[in-house]
Image: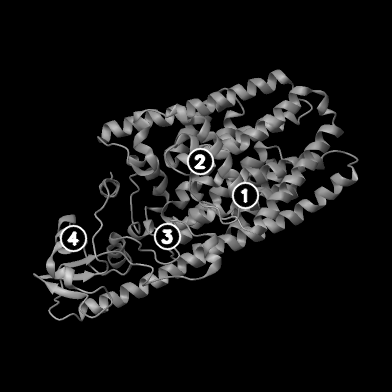
């Protein structure tokens, strides 16, 4: 076994090892808090144990991918599995982009693990390992498709499985495909015909993979007698695509990418002035490396190379944010923007190409020296942003725990209350009751990260009491909540936590958190009945 292990170790390229271990170590250093604490968001409250039957959301493979952690929120196990998948993805990505420098490969692996969109992924800890597996499948699918023949077929299947786990990771496959073609324009041994054929092959792989995903989804929906949820406009997929809006959707995709990297405080992002400066430096470094590669290797003499390189770079933002085009009725969330890391991968690709040029110019040498310093700044930003996510979420969790504990104390001390009595809580926790006035939290605030409470809706209070505090309080039927909120006695009650906000009415204990009850949407009801 030792001999076989040594043989396998020697067969691995140093750059691949560097990417793998750098991703693994950096991932643990950056996300350790998430792996050693339980910090649920609102979705995670009801997912302590969940079989992840999410066919109604188009994720027909998520159930099988989630079986690896026994369908249970176990942060340490999920963290280990997630980082192993990410580390493998980093190694395959480095090989796919032909990065040969061990330092640049290590930096690539570090950024893949630390990119802040991964922090949003770990806020959904119950699906994190499955989503990281989907990232690996997306990267591996491009790696296989790049090899043609049987590899192409296998790549198509893996892309369908990746999308069946989480559709957004098709953008990672698209972005890497564009970078592969971009890399070919910088390869002196590549010719126009071969590059063009590779481009057609990758386009076909993406199209067939997406078609296979959709075909399998239709089979699952038919067999289970289900319909897609209205969430993020998924149900509109069956009613036709708004082709007339395509130009505006493409423009919106580019606009969102620019805002993500350069506009502090923009929605569905986490950009800060520091990040915007780092992104400007990334653009300058990439430009220096690109010009150096074309001039030093004489590649500018082939017009197809110049046109191809510029075309791939121009298409990269669209590829990264292609979910806006695929899902025209919604705005992609930070969780859906992990492919944006490919902007930094493009810088590492160009730096590696420039690093291989003999007798570099002074500007080129200076840019290469600055790359590691620039990446250190990026990793510092990623470290702070991810842990800002976790800190804000943990504080919201603590605040909710305090609120729920005090609420149950009041309930149990209410005159007339008896154990086992039906508890009717009407309303959601308002920001008047729980509010985090910490300026830095605004950078990462998002609907998946409420900085005030992890129980923003009426149903979440019940989730928290039953699933997190282990208090056997069942959520009443919709009709019970609606009738209680419409009663004259309820109208006369003050709001919690005032005296009289908790009363026993007609054999039920009623808690008035808000003046009215907001009925669940059709989406929420369908989601609760998913299978």
What is the spatial separation of the Cα atoms under label 3 and label 1, in whole angstroms? 33 Å
Q: Secondary structure at mark 3?
A: loop
Dot 3: few (<14), some (14–19), or many (≥20) neighbours within 10 Å?
Answer: some
N-terminal-most mark, 3 or 2: 3
Q: Closest to the observer: 186 or 258? A: 258
x, y percent for residue 249? 50, 35
Q: Closest to the observer: 512 or 385? A: 512
What is the spatial separation of the Cα atoms under label 3 and label 4, in whole angstroms? 33 Å
x, y percent for residue 98? 70, 37
Q: Residue at x 33, y 45 (%)?
A: 53
Relative placement, left or right, of 50 versus 393 is left
N-terminal-most mark, 2 or 4: 2
Residues marked 3 and 2 touching at CB (< 8 Å): no
N-terminal-most mark, 3 or 4: 3
Relative placement, left or right, of 358 versus 232 is right
Label drawn at residue 481: 4
The residue indicated by pointer 2 is 169
The residue indicated by pointer 3 is 74
What is the spatial separation of the Cα atoms under label 3 and label 2, in whole angstroms? 24 Å
x, y percent for residue 226? 27, 37
Q: Quadrant of residue 175?
A: top right
Q: Residue at x 71, y 54 (%)?
A: 375
N-terminal-most mark, 2 or 1: 2
The residue indicated by pointer 1 is 261
Is the residue 440 above or below the residue 289 in the image?
A: below
N-terminal-most mark, 3 or 1: 3
What is the spatial separation of the Cα atoms under label 2 and label 1, in whole angstroms? 19 Å
């Amino acid at each position: 076994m030792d001999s076989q292990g040594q043989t396998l170790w020697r067969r691995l390229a140093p750059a691949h090892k560097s990417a793998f271990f750098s991703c693994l170590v950096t991932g643990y250093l950056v996300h350790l808090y998430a792996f050693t604490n339980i910090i649920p968001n609102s979705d995670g409250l009801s997912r302590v144990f969940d079989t992840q039957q999410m066919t109604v959301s188009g994720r027909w493979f998520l159930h099988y991918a989630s079986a690896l952690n026994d369908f249970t929120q176990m942060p340490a196990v999920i963290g280990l599995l997630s980082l192993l998948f990410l580390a493998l993805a980093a190694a395959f990505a480095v090989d796919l982009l032909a990065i040969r420098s061990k330092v640049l490969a290590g930096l690539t692996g570090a950024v893949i693990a630390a990119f802040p969109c991964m922090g949003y992924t770990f806020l959904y800890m119950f699906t994190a390992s499955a989503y990281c597996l989907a990232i690996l499948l997306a990267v591996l699918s491009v790696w296989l498709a790049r090899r043609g023949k049987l590899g192409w077929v296998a790549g198509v299947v893996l892309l369908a499985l990746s999308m069946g786990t989480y559709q957004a990771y098709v953008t990672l496959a698209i972005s890497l495909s564009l970078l592969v073609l971009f890399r070919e324009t910088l390869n002196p041994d590549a010719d126009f015909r071969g590059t063009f054929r590779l481009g057609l092959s990758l386009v076909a792989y993406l199209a067939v993979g997406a078609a296979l995903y959709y075909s399998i989804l239709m089979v699952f929906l038919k067999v289970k007698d289900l319909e897609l949820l209205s969430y993020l406009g998924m149900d509109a997929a069956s009613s036709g695509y708004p082709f007339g809006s395509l130009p505006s959707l493409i423009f919106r995709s580019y606009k969102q990418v620019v805002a993500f990297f350069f506009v502090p405080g923009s929605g569905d992002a986490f950009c800060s002035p520091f990040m915007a400066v780092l992104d400007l430096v990334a653009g300058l470094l990439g430009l220096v490396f690109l010009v150096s590669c074309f001039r030093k290797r004489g590649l500018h003499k082939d017009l197809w190379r110049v046109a191809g390189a510029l075309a791939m770079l121009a298409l990269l933002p669209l590829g990264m944010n292609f979910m806006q085009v695929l899902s025209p009725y919604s705005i992609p969330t930070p969780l859906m923007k992990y492919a944006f890391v490919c902007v930094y991968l493009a810088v590492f690709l160009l730096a590696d190409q420039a690093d291989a040029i003999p007798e570099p110019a002074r500007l080129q040498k200076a840019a290469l020296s600055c790359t590691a310093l620039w990446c250190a700044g990026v990793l510092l930003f990623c470290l702070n942003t991810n842990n800002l996510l976790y800190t804000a979420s943990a504080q919201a969790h603590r605040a909710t725990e305090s609120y729920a504990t005090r609420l149950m104390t009041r309930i149990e001390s209410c005159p007339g209350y008896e154990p086992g009595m039906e508890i009717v809580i009407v309303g959601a926790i308002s920001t008047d009751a729980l509010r985090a006035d910490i300026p830095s939290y605004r950078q990462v605030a998002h609907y998946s990260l409420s900085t005030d409470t992890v129980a923003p809706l009426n149903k979440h209070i019940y989730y928290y009491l039953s699933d997190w505090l282990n208090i056997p309080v069942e959520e009443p039927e919709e009709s019970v909540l609606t009738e209680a909120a419409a009663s004259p006695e309820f109208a006369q009650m003050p709001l919690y936590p005032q005296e009289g906000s908790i009363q026993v009415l007609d054999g039920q204990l009623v808690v008035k958190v808000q003046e009215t009850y907001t009925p669940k949407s059709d989406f929420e009801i369908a989601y609760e009945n998913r299978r």
